[in-house]
C-alpha cells in the first residue's frame, strides 16, 4: 500500500524538462506496464476508493481534469504527456483513469446528453421550413387564382391593330389613358337586372381615365351614353362590317364591342387609348361589399322599383346591392336626366376611392385581397392589363395620388338641338378639355354652383381694353364642373 500511496502522489518536477512540460505519471505507467496492475473493471481492493463515487480532495465534479495544484494535475494533462499515445497515457486498459479524476471517456457521454437536450432546435427548424413552404404555396395559389379570374380581350386588340394607321399618336409617353366601360349586359348573372335580350350589351357607363405622367393627379371624364357622335365602320361579332354613322355614343359598344367604342372615343377626343377595362354589374357590387360598404347622404328618401332601391333620407352606408341601385337609378332621382345620374356615379366612385385609401385597403394585403378578387372576377381587359402583376403596378402607381387630385367630371355637353333627349358637346370647352388631357396638362374641377358664380364674376370683370394684358398673363388652368374623391357626400 505504501508503494501505491507514493505512486499516486506523483514525482517531483524534472529540472531538465522545460517549464510547462510534464513527465508521465508513474501510476499511469504501472497500470499499463506492470503485470500486477489492477484493471479498473475488476473488484477494487478493500478500502480502495471508487473514483466515480468519491473524487479526491480538490477535484471539482464535472470538470475534465482535477483542480489540485500539485503534480497530479500535471500528470493528468493527458494528450501532451510523453508516451501517452492516442489515449492520452492516463487511462487503464479499458480507457478509464486509474486515479479518481473524471476521465476523457466521459466526454462522449456529456456530448450525447447535450445533444439529447436540444432536439427542439431540430424540430423548430423543421417546423419553420414547413411554414415557409405552406405560406409560399398559399401565396402562389392566391396569385394564380386572382390572375385566372381576369378575362383577356384579344379580339379588340386584333381589330385595333387593323386600324392602327387611323389611331391617334401618343403625345406624352409616361401618361396613361384608360377607358373604363360599365356593361349593362343582362345575360348570365346580370339577368336579374333586366330582360335578357340574347346577351347583347351596351355601355351603360363610359369613363376616360387619364393618369398624369408624374402620377400626381388622375382625371376621370364621363362620356354620356346619349351623346351624339360619329361612329366609324366597325366589325361585328359575326365578322360583318357596319357602316359609318352619326348616332348616340353607347350604340358603338352594341354594334362593334370594345374596339368600336375605343375607336369612337379616339375619333371624338384625339386621345390615344392605352388600355381598357370592362366591368359588369356584379363586379361593381362585389367591390363595394369588399370594402364593407360606402357612406352617402340622401336629402330625400328613394323608392325606385326599377332600380330595386328603397332608402330613407339621411346619412347611411350602402352595401353592394344598394350601391348598384343607387348609381343606376334615374327616373326617380333629381330631374331624371342622364347628366344627373352621371354626376351621382362620379361622386359615389369618389367616395369608393376615398374609402379604399383612408382605410388602408391598398396597403393591407388582408383587406386588398377581397377587393382584387371581386374586381378580377368580372373584369375583361386588353392583353396589357390581363395579369395581376399588371393591375398591381397600375394600382401602386395611383396609390400616392392625393384624393383631392382624383377628379371626376362630365365632358361639357348640352341638349342636342334636334332632339332634347340626346346630348351634344359644348364647344370650344370640350375641345379644350381633350387638348389638356392629350398633352398631360392640368385641369381643375369645382361644384356646379361654384363654377356658375365664378363664370358670372369673370364676365363682369372683363373689359374691352383688357385684351392686351390677357395675352401676356399666364394661361389659367381650365376649370370644369365636377368633384374630387376628397369631397364628403354628406357636406354637399
Image (spheres, rainbow, N blue to C red):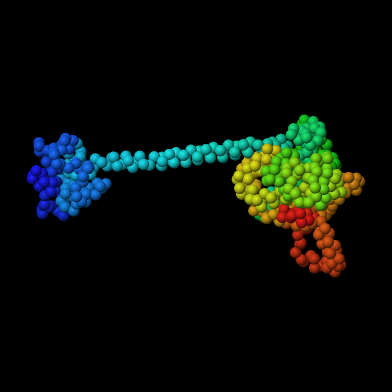
Look at the picture and state if 320 lies above or below 455.
Answer: above
**Nearest the camera: 29 or 160?**
29
Query: Which residue, as the protein is rendered here, is positioned at the far front?
Result: 47
Q: Residue at x 27, y 42 (%)?
A: 107
Instruction: Name the spot of residue 130 as percent of width and height, x first.
Output: 48, 38
Instruction: Name the spot of residue 77 as percent of width and height, x first.
Output: 19, 48
Look at the picture and state if 467 lies above or below 151.
Answer: below
Q: Relative to 222, is 137 on the left or the right?
A: left
Q: Residue at x 13, y 39 (%)?
A: 46
Instruction: Name the spot of residue 400 as percent of width and height, x first.
Output: 64, 53
Instruction: Name the spot of residue 470 as percent of width and height, x first.
Output: 80, 66
**Nearest the camera: 485 or 254?**
485
Q: Quadrant of residue 466?
A: bottom right
Query: Which residue, as the protein is rendered here, is positioned at the far right?
Result: 418
* Quadrant of the rendering where the C terminus is positioned: bottom right
**Is residue 333 shown to the viewer in this render?**
yes
**Nearest the camera: 104 or 267?**
104
**Is residue 264 shown to the viewer in this render?**
no
Q: Residue at x 65, y 40 (%)?
A: 373
**Nearest the camera: 465 or 391?**
391
Amino acid at each position: 500500500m505504501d508503494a501505491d500511496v507514493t505512486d499516486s502522489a506523483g514525482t517531483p518536477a524534472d529540472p531538465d524538462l522545460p517549464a510547462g512540460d510534464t513527465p508521465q505519471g508513474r501510476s499511469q505507467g504501472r497500470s499499463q506496464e506492470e503485470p500486477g496492475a489492477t484493471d479498473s473493471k475488476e473488484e477494487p481492493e478493500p478500502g480502495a476508493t471508487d473514483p466515480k463515487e468519491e473524487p479526491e480532495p480538490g477535484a471539482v465534479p464535472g470538470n475534465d481534469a482535477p483542480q489540485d495544484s500539485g503534480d497530479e494535475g500535471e500528470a493528468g494533462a493527458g494528450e501532451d504527456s510523453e508516451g501517452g499515445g492516442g489515449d492520452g497515457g492516463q487511462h487503464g486498459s479499458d480507457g478509464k483513469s486509474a486515479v479518481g479524476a473524471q476521465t476523457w471517456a466521459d466526454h462522449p457521454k456529456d456530448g450525447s446528453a447535450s445533444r439529447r437536450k436540444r432536439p427542439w432546435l431540430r424540430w423548430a427548424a423543421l417546423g419553420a421550413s414547413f411554414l415557409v413552404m405552406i405560406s409560399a404555396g398559399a401565396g402562389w395559389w392566391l396569385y394564380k387564382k386572382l390572375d385566372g379570374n381576369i378575362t383577356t380581350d384579344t379580339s379588340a386588340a386584333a381589330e385595333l391593330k387593323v386600324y392602327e394607321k387611323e389611331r391617334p399618336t401618343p403625345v406624352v409617353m409616361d401618361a396613361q389613358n384608360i377607358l373604363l366601360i360599365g356593361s349593362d349586359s343582362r345575360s348570365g348573372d346580370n339577368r336579374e337586372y333586366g330582360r335578357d335580350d340574347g346577351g347583347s350589351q351596351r355601355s351603360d357607363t363610359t369613363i376616360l381615365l387619364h393618369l398624369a405622367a408624374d402620377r400626381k393627379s388622375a382625371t376621370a371624364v364621363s362620356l354620356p351614353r346619349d351623346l351624339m357622335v360619329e361612329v366609324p365602320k366597325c366589325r361585328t361579332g359575326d365578322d360583318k362590317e357596319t357602316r359609318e354613322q352619326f348616332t348616340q355614343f353607347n350604340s358603338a359598344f352594341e354594334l362593334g364591342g370594345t374596339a368600336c367604342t375605343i375607336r369612337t372615343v379616339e375619333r371624338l377626343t384625339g386621345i390615344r387609348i392605352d388600355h381598357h377595362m370592362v366591368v359588369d354589374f356584379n363586379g361593381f357590387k362585389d367591390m363595394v361589399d369588399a370594402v364593407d360598404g360606402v357612406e352617402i347622404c340622401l336629402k330625400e328618401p328613394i323608392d325606385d322599383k326599377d332600380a330595386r332601391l328603397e332608402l330613407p333620407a339621411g346619412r347611411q352606408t350602402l352595401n353592394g346591392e344598394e350601391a348598384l341601385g343607387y348609381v343606376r337609378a334615374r327616373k326617380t332621382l333629381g330631374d331624371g336626366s342622364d347628366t344627373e345620374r352621371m354626376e351621382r356615379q362620379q361622386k359615389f366612385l369618389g367616395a369608393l376611392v376615398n374609402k379604399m385609401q383612408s382605410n388602408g385597403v391598398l396597403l393591407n394585403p388582408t383587406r386588398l385581397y377581397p377587393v382584387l378578387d371581386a374586381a378580377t372576377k368580372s373584369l375583361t381587359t386588353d392583353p396589357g392589363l390581363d395579369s395581376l402583376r399588371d393591375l398591381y403596378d397600375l394600382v401602386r402607381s395611383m396609390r400616392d395620388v392625393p384624393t383631392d387630385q382624383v377628379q371626376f367630371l362630365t365632358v361639357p355637353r348640352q341638349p342636342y338641338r334636334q332632339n332634347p333627349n340626346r346630348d351634344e358637346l359644348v364647344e370650344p370647352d370640350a375641345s379644350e378639355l381633350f387638348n389638356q388631357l392629350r398633352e398631360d396638362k392640368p385641369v381643375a374641377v369645382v361644384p356646379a354652383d361654384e363654377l356658375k358664380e365664378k363664370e358670372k364674376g369673370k364676365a363682369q370683370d372683363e373689359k374691352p381694353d383688357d385684351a392686351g394684358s390677357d395675352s401676356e398673363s399666364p394661361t389659367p388652368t381650365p376649370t370644369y364642373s365636377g368633384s374630387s374623391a376628397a369631397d364628403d357626400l354628406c357636406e354637399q
